[in-house]
Amino acid sequence: MSGIEIQKVTAHIGARVSGIDIAKPLDEESAAAVREALNIHKALVFDDVNLDDESQQAFVRHLGEVTTAHPTVASVDGVPNVLPVDSERGRAANHWHTDVTFVLNPPQASTLRSITLPPYGGETLIASSAAAYRQLPESLRQLADTLWAEHTNDYDYAVPEEAIDEEEAAQRARFTSIKYRTVHPVVRVHPLTGERGLFIGGFAQRIVGLSPGESRKILDLLQAYVTRPENILRHRWSPNQLVLFDNRITQHYAVDNYDGRPRRLHRVTAAGDIPVGIEGKESWSIEGDASHYTPVAA
């Protein structure tokens, strides 16, 4: 791989990739190097990328088929596969989550590209759920291995409805305009590396077979391992950057610390497979058809 350099950023997650122009079509050797780096480091940062919406999608196609923007949220005007992650459209990403886990086959990978940045703040945190799983005490790991969780886009918000304005209420209504409920393994086996990771996050609302109160205690306990500071890449955005992360084995969080200044990223995701637990059993859907949003990756 002549010219491609991969510099590790933290012990458990993140690498900076240089020596490659991802605005141009990649040869198979370069594409394979990016995929291998993603398997190892979980999140990759590309500087000075000079991408537009079309070339961002072209880059994602090296990973798999591109999904539409979102099951319920509108895309960038005229670009059905690109989601605007825009401070003016609300701050739904200000909670720890893995993208779109409420559908049967969430995206395998997500890309975020900087468009408009505030003068300060607005970082994106990305956490390794593989490192979190490895750090569990043996007894807790054995428990997690047996658990399944229901994920939904119709979840309990931290801010009650009576405390939000009309625009925020409308955004919330759009997000839940099609209700999805899907059961995934709490411990997911990565289809390429065989690594195990905690597949939970903000859309995971209930452990199958447990009450909501019991579920919340267990989910919070496991989530605390995901969000340990040593498991997190804190990415401070610069102009013309692209961040690629493996949605199968990470969580992320958009930090709301920029005083409401304009902040806009464009997201493009690659279609994923149906998650599988440690015994080879697949996730299953309870409610909601996402076929308009994503094909199932082979």
Image: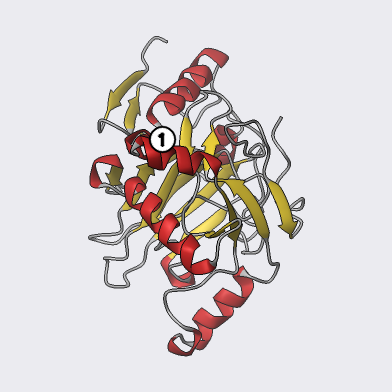
For residue 2, side relative to residue 289 (left or right): left
Q: Residues within 10 Å of mark 1 (few under 14, many from 20)?
A: many
Task: From the viewer's side, name the closer residue of 157 and 65.
Answer: 157
Q: Residue at the location (43% across, 47% down)?
A: 251
Query: Where 152 sits versus 46, above or below?
Result: below
Query: Where 207 sits versus 164, above or below?
Result: above
Q: Quadrant of residue 182?
A: bottom right
Q: Residue at the location (31% across, 69% down)?
A: 261
Amino acid type, label 1: Ala
Quadrant (top left/top right/bottom left/bottom right) for the C terminus = top right
For residue 119, side relative to residue 278 (left or right): left
The coloring applied to the image is secondary structure
Q: Quadrant of residue 44?
A: top left
Q: Residue at the location (54% across, 22% down)?
A: 26
Return the x and y of residue 137 as percentages of the image width and height: 33, 38
Return the x and y of residue 259 as percentages of the image width and height: 27, 72
For residue 276, side relative to residue 12 (left or right): right
Residue 240 shows in the view: no
Query: Where 134 sits versus 157, above or below?
Result: above
Task: From the viewer's side, name the closer residue of 269 and 224.
Answer: 224
Q: Which residue is mark 1?
A: 130
